[in-house]
Amino acid sequence: MKKLGVICILCSFAFFANSRDLSTGYRGFVDIGYSIGLDDSAESHIDLMTTHGYQVLPQLFLGVGTGINYYGQHGMDNVTIPIYADARFDLNSNRYSPFADAKIGYSPCVNDIKGFYMSLGGGLRFNFSRSLAGNIGLFYILQKVNTDFGRGNIDGIALKVGIEF
């Protein structure tokens, strides 16, 4: 019984020691996050994003994506759908790897909210296998708001978790 336990532990180390290979090719992400509002309205939101693109170099990913941001506090009850270009820099492809990420785009008119979108941040990538990894990070998010009633910003700090494949 002891030998079986040792074999299981060694096999699990072998499984988790493999890192997600960051050679050139397709790479996709799905992230979910919660942003705490920093502006005067203190409007927080939940977001769900998906990004797809190409690993240009072992450290550089370029892609495009979209998502849904739901603002449901302070009576706002609104949605934005940002469409963005994404650039991501991974320090390495080890078991744990820091990364930096920048998304820049635009949210077309949904429920009278539209405008420039930006997300800047970084975090830590956890490799589960050669084809799957997890991410956790802290981001600054800016959503410009151009409505019939005026202009403004909705900005915040977001904690996001996600998977990549």
Image: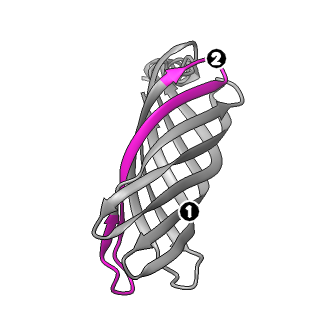
* Side (left or right) of 29 relative to 77: right
Q: Is residue 100 above or below residue 68?
A: above
Q: Which residues are magenta?
A: 54-79
Q: Which residue is mark 2?
A: 57
Q: Residues within 10 Å of mark 2 (few under 14, many from 20)?
A: some
Q: In the rendered structure, which disc, 2 or 1, sits on the residue that comes first in sequence? A: 2
Tell me the element at label 1. Answer: strand
Q: Which residue is mark 1?
A: 142
Which kind of residue does numbered mark 2 sit on? Leu
* Side (left or right) of 138 relative to 68: right
* Side (left or right) of 76 relative to 21: left
The residue shown at (72%, 30%) is: 91
* Side (left or right) of 62 relative to 96: left
- How far apart are the two marked residues, 2 and 1, measured between alpha carbons? 28 Å
Q: Is residue 118 above or below residue 100?
A: below
The residue shown at (36%, 77%) is: 148
